[in-house]
Each structure stands twice: as C-alpha cells, then as structure tokens.
C-alpha cells in the first residue's frame, strides 16, 4: 500500500487508500491482531500526510475567483482540515 500511495496521481486515489487502510485497521482490531493493526494505522497516517501535502501544493485561485468546490470529489471539508493538519503536525511523523 505504501507504493500505491506514492504512485497515486490524485488526491481521491490517496483518500481511497486511506479508507482501505482504516477498514483493515478496524478488522485487525476486531481480530485482536495488534501487529496488523499498527501496520494499518501507519499506512493510514502516511496516506493522510500525503493527502495533506498534496492539498497544500494545490495552486490557489487568482484573487477575485472562488476556490474550487470539492462537491465532485469524495473529500469532505473535515477530511481536508484533518489531512492538512496531519501534513503540518511535526508530532505525527
């Protein structure tokens, strides 16, 4: 999954990887498999940081234009805020 994060071309692809890692993390927790849960958590956090990094790299609209609406994507405003925080939080790495 880590290679998939690097190979992903869009933020939506990275978010899909994050969602899969979260699901696997929950399954591992239910199975009481602590090692697998930790690995899935690390992958999820790596995907969140990558998504936040990519969101920060996006070009801002010129003055006077409204920012792009995220309605067409699967990314909610809360996801954007969380992932941008993860990308800037030095304690999360």
Image: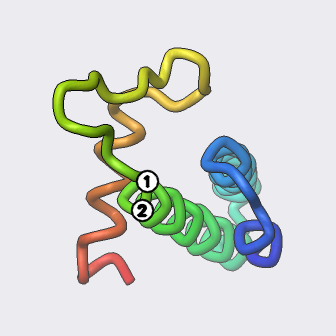
Q: Nearer the viewer, residue 1 or 64?
A: 64
Q: Nearer the viewer, residue 56 or 80?
A: 56
Left or right? Give the position of 11 relative to 33.
Answer: left
Above or below 59: residue 68: above
Question: Mark 2 falls on what kind of element?
Answer: helix
For the view shown, which residue lies furthest in the top direction?
71
Task: Residue 38: give x, y in percent of width and height.
Answer: 60, 74
Above or below 28: residue 41: below
Task: Residue 53: give x, y in percent of width and height.
Answer: 43, 66
Question: Mark 1 falls on what kind of element?
Answer: loop
Q: Quadrant of residue 93?
A: bottom left
For the view shown, which residue lies furthest in the left direction?
64
Q: Which residue is drawn at the image coordinates 27% and 58% (left, top)?
A: 85
- Residue 16 is marked as none
Left or right? Give the position of 78 relative to 20.
Answer: left
Q: Which residue is drawn at the image coordinates 26% and 70% (left, top)?
A: 88
Task: Residue 28: give x, y in percent of width and height.
Answer: 72, 58
Colouring method of the image: rainbow
Mark pair 2, 1: CA separation:
4 Å
Mark 2 in CB contact with mark 1 (< 8 angstroms): yes
Residue picked out by circle 1: 58
Q: Which residue is drawn at the image coordinates 81% and 77% (left, top)?
A: 3
Residue picked out by circle 2: 57
Left or right? Give the position of 77 relative to 64.
Answer: right
Mark 1 packing: few (<14 Cα in 10 Å), some, or many (20+)?
Answer: few
Q: Which residue is drawn at the image coordinates 66% and 54% (left, top)?
A: 14
Q: Nearer the viewer, residue 56 or 91?
A: 56
Q: How many marks?
A: 2
Above or below 8: residue 13: above
Mark 2 packing: few (<14 Cα in 10 Å), some, or many (20+)?
Answer: few
State which quarter of the image contains the N terminus.
bottom right
Task: Residue 33: give x, y in percent of width and height.
Answer: 72, 68
């Amino acid at each position: 999954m880590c290679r998939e994060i690097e190979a992903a071309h869009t933020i939506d692809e990275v978010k899909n990887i994050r969602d899969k890692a979260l699901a696997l993390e929950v399954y591992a927790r239910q199975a009481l498999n602590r090692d697998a849960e930790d690995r899935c958590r690390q992958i999820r956090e790596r995907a969140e940081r990558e998504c936040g990094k990519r969101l920060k790299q996006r070009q801002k609209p010129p003055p006077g234009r409204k920012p792009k609406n995220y309605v067409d994507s699967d990314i909610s405003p809360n996801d954007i805020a969380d992932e941008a925080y993860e990308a800037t939080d030095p304690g999360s790495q």
